[in-house]
Amino acid sequence: MKCPFCGKDQDKVIESRTTNDGEIIRRRRECEQCGERFTSYERIEPRAAFVIKKDGRREPYDRDKIKRGLLKAVEKRPISMEKIEQVLQNIEHKIPYNNENEVSTDQVGLLVMEELEKLDPVAYVRFASVYREFKTVNEFVEEIKTLK
């Protein structure tokens, strides 16, 4: 695996453990070149699927796109990467694919909001404001009232 610090591809695994009921393997690694430590995760790739966008376009399912949205929502919040990985795993388990192995962005967005609501109310409101395209402060206030 390529070191994120120096770019060399010689490292050793220091520790391995499973998370999420054995669905993910977390490995602590140490670069043999620069000595820096980093973490990698191994998981089973989800079945090939497409996401149907609001305008009807279809694009391949992209786990990293959901992860980027989650990271933006939890920015400067006390949420670990392990919790983010757990949320991603929960979302992927709940995605209701149809016969063509497709899911709508609405379904994915609602699943993300459901998970964020349980995880962190601030992150939930941040994500909801973008997902639901809030245009006024009143829309924020109404969404916050639903959390109480």
Image: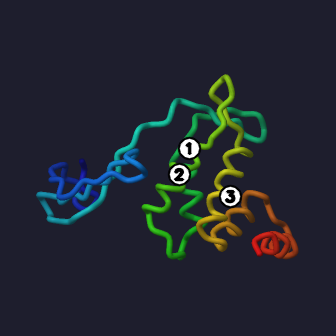
Secondary element at image label 1: helix
Q: Please tell me which residue lies in front, 49 or 8.
A: 49
Which residue occupies 55% across, 50% down? 90
Residue 28: image x %, image y %?
A: 25, 58
Instruction: Check whether the beta carbons of the residues at disc 1 and disc 2 lie within 8 A of each other.
Output: yes
Q: In screen coordinates, is 39 left or right of 87?
A: left
Relative vertical location of residue 148 with respect to residue 44 in this rendering, above or below? below
What numbered label is drawn on residue 83? none
**Label 1, on which residue?**
92
Which residue occupies 22% across, 60% down? 6
Gap in angstroms between the C-alphas marked 1 and 2: 6 Å
Instruction: Check whether the beta carbons of the residues at disc 3 and disc 1 lie within 8 A of each other.
Output: no
Quadrant of the rendering where the C terminus is positioned: bottom right
Pick out the residue farthest to the left.
Answer: 32
**Neighbourhood count class around disc 2 (C-alpha, 10 Å): few under 14, some 14–19, many 20 upward:** some
What numbered label is drawn on residue 88? 2
Q: Amino acid at mark 3?
A: Met
Q: Please tell me which residue lies in front, 96 or 105.
A: 96
What numbered label is drawn on residue 113? 3
Q: Amino acid at mark 1?
A: Glu
Q: In screen coordinates, is 127 left or right of 68?
A: right
**Neighbourhood count class around disc 1 (C-alpha, 10 Å): few under 14, some 14–19, many 20 upward:** some
Relative vertical location of residue 51 with respect to residue 10 in this rendering, above or below? above
Q: Amino acid at mark 2?
A: Leu
Whichever of callouts 3 and 1 sits on the residue coming sooner in the sequence is 1
Which residue occupies 53% across, 51% down? 88
Secondary element at image label 3: helix
Pick out the residue farthest to the front.
Answer: 21
Residue 10: image x %, image y %?
A: 15, 50
Q: In screen coordinates, is 49 left or right of 131?
A: left
Whichever of callouts 3 and 2 sits on the residue coming sooner in the sequence is 2
